[in-house]
Image: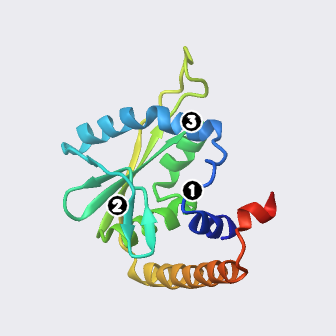
Amino acid sequence: MHKLALEIIRGKAGPEGFKSADMERGHRLEDEARQLYAFMKDIDPERIGFVRNGKMGASPDSFVGAKGGLEIKTALPHIQMERLIKQTLPTEHKAQVQGLMLVCERDSWDFLSFPAPYEPDDPDPVPLPPFLITVARDDKYIRAMRDEIETFNDELEHLVDQMRALGTDPVKVAA
């Protein structure tokens, strides 16, 4: 919250944060996964940038038709195997998927877990299939999420007002 407050006061974003090897892998394989999804569903997912909805925002991987969306995650073989066995949306991605439906005002979201090799040029990758599930909008969960986001935004606005009331540039003060 404090980082966002400073970005609002400064009028620009701070330095980009940490990027893990998993994040790099996901970025590298996203186009391949999107092409596979398009083939599997016989549909052309629409690439989307950042979506704003009031004081909320999200970065969907794609829109699908007028009412759906797509979230792509790459998974190392041991994680992909677990997802294939469970056949459910991984709990660690529930808030993201439901949040995307909230911000983008969509009714459903496809979650594609795309198998990734342990190493980028692995000569002997584990042959696992993709895992695809369609997630329905959970209005009760989304209402609770919206309430929490509104509380966060109110607290953020209060923090920005407090800093501006000091009459100093917090960036210069910190230097």
Q: CA distance from mark 2 to mark 3?
A: 23 Å
Label ID, residue 147? none
Residue on which the image places disc 2: 109
Q: Is residue 27 left or right of residue 49?
A: right
Mark 2 residue crowding within 10 angstroms, few (<14) / some (14–19) / many (20+) = many
Residue on which the image places disc 1: 13
Q: Is residue 128 left or right of residue 63?
A: right
State the SS at label 1: loop
> The disc labelled 1 sits on which kind of residue?
Ala
The chosen color scheme is rainbow
Residue on which the image places disc 3: 24
Q: CA distance from mark 3 to mark 1?
A: 21 Å
Q: CA distance from mark 2 to mark 1?
A: 29 Å
Give the mark count. 3
N-terminal-most mark, 3 or 1: 1
Where is residue 69? Give x, y as percent: 31, 57
> Residue at horizontal 66%, vertical 71%?
1
